[in-house]
Amino acid sequence: MPLQDGYGVLAGTLHSYSCDRIKRDGQYYHCTVRVKAGPRIYRCPVDLDNKKSSDGIQWRVVEMGRTSLKGISELGDGWHTLRSNPHSGALDYYRSPELTPTEEYRRAYDDAPDNIMNAPASGCVPWRYGTGAAAFRDLEPLLKHARRLYVFGEPFRTGKGVHNIHQNQGDPPDSRWFGENGIWQDGCIVAERWNHTVAAFLCKFKSQRFITADAMSHLSA
């Protein structure tokens, strides 16, 4: 099943950001990015809770070409619903070529039955493993230097905001979020800098797999 309240992207500019008070083990629960889109301010909580594990959060910062935004950069400020397919501008951590493959992806691909997806190309940006505080240290420079922000995820059911700004596939069957696993619906923050370079911040939880079948099966990495 897809995300309950749909999927899309919020386009706008940075208004402000803040994080929950840091906890003893160095984790953040959420860092909230506030995005200005026209006269409205949207609240975008990024879940960086490492669940009391030293490597519970996994993240990447991927440098993208501006043309990789596939028309997203032409959208006006505000929320835009996207279909969960490769032609709408939706993002998928493992299927979007502009996000580049990873070593974990390749290992999972090699182990997957019938090699369910096209073989990944060479070259990758590795996943980093650590705490929410460490992940935020990589996200913060993107926010500070952003000319424009694109926040991919699920819209709030009530109020103005976006959540599920992380991988939205690969949750295990015993997870409360298993029913929302789906492809072409991953959340992330994409920052277009003042020099017109573009970078994406991707994050996932350790419990989520690195690769999933088109039928949303849960494969081992």
Image: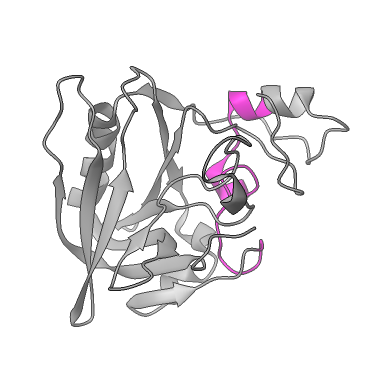
The x, y position of residue 192, in whole percent, is 33, 58
The x, y position of residue 51, in whole percent, is 34, 27
How would you classify the magenta stretch by its main secondary structure?
loop
The x, y position of residue 31, in whole percent, is 22, 45
| Frontmost residue, 99 versus 189 | 189
The x, y position of residue 87, in whole percent, is 65, 67
Rendered-image quadrant of the N terminus: bottom right
| Frontmost residue, 104 versus 99 | 104
User: In the figure, is residue 168 to the left or right of 166?
Assistant: right
Q: Looking at this view, name the residue that lies furthest to the right.
A: 114
Total numbered labels placed on residues in the image: 0
Q: Which residue is at a point 59% across and 35% down the rendered structure image?
A: 174
Above or below: residue 186 compared with residue 148: above
Segment tinted magenta in the rendering: 85-106
Q: Is residue 145 visible?
A: no
Q: Which residue is at a point 11% across and 36% down the rendered structure image?
A: 21
User: In the figure, is residue 120 to the left or right of 155?
Assistant: right
In the rendered structure, does residue 159 fall within the stretch colored magenta?
no
Q: Which residue is at a point 28% across and 53% down the rendered structure image?
A: 45
Above or below: residue 125 compared with residue 160: above
Q: Which residue is at a point 37% across and 52% down the rendered structure image?
A: 189
